[in-house]
Image (cartoon, rainbow, N blue to C red):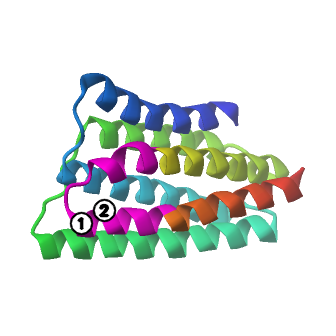
Amino acid sequence: MFVRLSAAVAALSLLTGAALAQGAKPTDPQIAHIAYTAGVIDITAAKQAISKAGSKDVKAFAEDMVRDHEAVNKQALDLVKKLKVTPEDNDTSKTLSKQAADKLAELGKLKGADYDKAYVANEVAYHKAVNGALETLLIPSAGDAELKSLLQTGLKIFQGHQQHAEHVAATLK
């Protein structure tokens, strides 16, 4: 469980730390791809939780994650089409995807209450990391006003997800 948590935090810390250390900020096409990738990662984890979770609260939370992240990702895709921007794959999005796939397999080996606790604890950590990256790097680096606005809207939604995950985690102890 803690390996999954630290991987999510490390991946997004890598994102903010590497970009800030180089003094380079991500471009709008890179930001779009990073944000979309982070959403896909959470959707994939939530779909696994819907099939594996034993707790009805965990399943309901996972269903909310699928619904909300799919809606935000659809808005993101609509926006990049409107702006005629091609999301740009980059080292950050590739690293996030690889680590998420590895850790999803690790979570998949858990069952019952162990799975429920690990999934929800990961959701708390993942949303903290994503929210931090949005606040400190992605939103400030976004050049396009509509992209920045979508990221700000996403941040509000994802802060709510973090609070919801924290609440569900507290009920599982």
Q: Disc 2, disc 1: CB below 8 Å? A: yes
Q: Which residue type does callout 1 highlight?
A: Ala
Q: Residues within 10 Å of mark 2 (few under 14, many from 20)?
A: some
Q: Which residue type does callout 2 highlight?
A: Lys
User: Quadrant location of residue 97?
Assistant: top left
- Residue at 24% x, 27% y: name it: 23
Residue 35 lies left or right of residue 86; in this view the side is right
- Residue at 35% x, 53% y: name it: 139
**Residue 26's spot in the image, x, y percent?**
23, 42
User: Element type at marker 2?
Assistant: helix
In the rendered image, the vertical position of residue 10 relative to residue 131, given as above or below: above
User: Element type at marker 1?
Assistant: helix
Residue 57 lies left or right of residue 135; in this view the side is right
Region rendered in magenta: 133-155
The residue at the far top in this view is: 21
Q: To which residue does mark 1 refer?
A: 145
**Residue 72's spot in the image, x, y percent?**
41, 71
In the rendered image, the vertical position of residue 152 relative to residue 169, given as above or below: below
**Residue 133's spot in the image, x, y percent?**
44, 44
Q: To which residue does mark 2 refer?
A: 148
Labels in figure, total: 2
Q: Main secondary structure of the magenta part?
A: helix
Residue 54 lies left or right of residue 130; in this view the side is right
**Residue 2's spot in the image, x, y percent?**
69, 32
